[in-house]
Amino acid sequence: MKVLSFGSLNIDYTYRVDHFVQKGETLSSESLQVFSGGKGLNQSIALAKAGAEVYHAGVIGEDGKFLLEIMEEAGVDTSCVKILHDVRTGNAIIQNDKEGDNCILLYGGANQAITKAQIDAVLERFGEGDHLVLQNEINELPYLVNKAHEKGLKIVLNPSPMNEKIFALPLQFVDYFLLNEVEAEQLLQWKPDSEDDVDVLAAALEAKFPNATIVLTIGSAGSIFTNGDKQFRQPSFRVKAVDTTAAGDTFSGFFIAGLLSGLSEEASMERASKAAAIAVTRPGAAPSIPTKDEVDSF
C-alpha cells in the first residue's frame, strides 16, 4: 500500500529566544536558523524514514526547490509537487525558548494555491487501500477528502492548526484522527471538568466519530489509542527537550508507517513514541526526525 501525503511545504525561520515576545515588546534573538518544514513535509519525511512508500503532493514557489531535495534524500517521491513562479513558498516564523517550547506564526503562500485540477491529477495515481495523510495547512481540503473517499483511500487527519475550516470537512470519512488535547477539545467544542481527565476526552472523541481510530497525544503523559474495540495508553519516554516543533508530525509518520508494515497497534504506538522522544532532543523540524534504525535501537 502507498501513502499519499498531501500537505504543506514550508521554509522555517527559527529564532532562539530567552522567552516568547510579548505585546509591545522588541526582543533580540540569540540566533536564527533556516530549516525545511511544514506539517506536510515533516509527516512525509517521518513516513519515509519509518519505511513507508510515501508520495508527497503540494505546491511550492521557486524559492522552495531545496525542499524537494531534502524530501528526496529522505526517500520521499516528490513527483506530485507543483512549482509555481508567481507565489512564494509557505513559511513559518518560529520562536524557540530556553525551555525547548515553541510558538509559530504561519504564512500560507503556495500552500494555499492547491487546485481541484491538481487534486484530480494526483489521485489518479492512487486507489483503494492506499492511505491519504492530511493536516490543515493547505486549501481545498473538503474536495480532497471527498474525492479520496470516493476512490476508497484510507484518510488520516491531523486537524492542525485547528480552526473553523476543519468543521467544513466531511469528518465522517476520516479513518484516523491523530491529535493533541487542545485540538481534541476544539474539535469537540467541549472541555472535560478536570484538566487531567484525558480518558473522558478520548471517550468523547470515540463517541463522536465511532467509525474512526483515535490517537490522542497528551504531552509528557504519553498518548491514548482507542478504536471502539480496544483502548490503551502508551507512556512517553523521558528525555531532555530541546525543540518540540516536529514531535507530533514524527509521531504521526512512525505510527502510520508501523501499521502499514504489519506492526500491531501497540507496537506502532510504542515506536511512534520513541521516534517523537528522539525528535524533541534535536533542533529544527524535519532535521530532527530520526531514522528507523535510530528508533529501533533507542
Image (cartoon, rainbow, N blue to C red):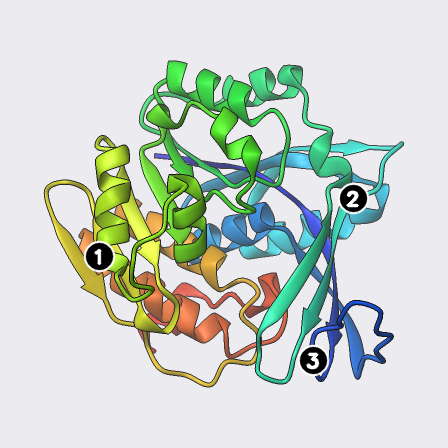
Q: Which residue is mark 1?
A: 199
- Decide if residue 261 is in sight here: no
Crowd class of label 3 (few under 14; some 14 to 19; many from 20; radius 10 Å): some
Q: Is residue 27 left or right of residue 209?
A: right
Q: In the displayed structure, would residue 119 be above or below residue 139?
A: above
Looking at marks 2 and 3 on the same chain, the residue that comes earlier in the sequence is marked by: 3
- The x, y position of residue 278, in whole percent, is 44, 74
Q: Secondary structure at mark 1?
A: helix
The answer to whether 173 appears left or right of 118 in the picture is left
Image quadrant occupied by the C terminus: bottom left
Q: Amino acid at mark 1?
A: Asp
| Image position, residue 270 (x, y; %) | 26, 65
Name the residue at 50% across, 80% down. 241
Where is mark 3, residue-wise? 19
Percent x, y of residue 134:
49, 38
| Image mark for residue 89 | 2
Which one is nearer the viewer's eye here, 63 or 19?
19
Residue drawn at x 79%, y 84% is 30
- Coordinates of residue 121 in the picture (x, y in percent): 59, 17
- Does label 1 or label 3 sit earlier along the sequence? 3
Q: Is residue 128 placed above or below 289 in the rendered structure? A: above
Res 6 quadrant in image? top right
CA distance separating discs 1 and 3? 32 Å
**Amino acid at the residue labelled 3:** His
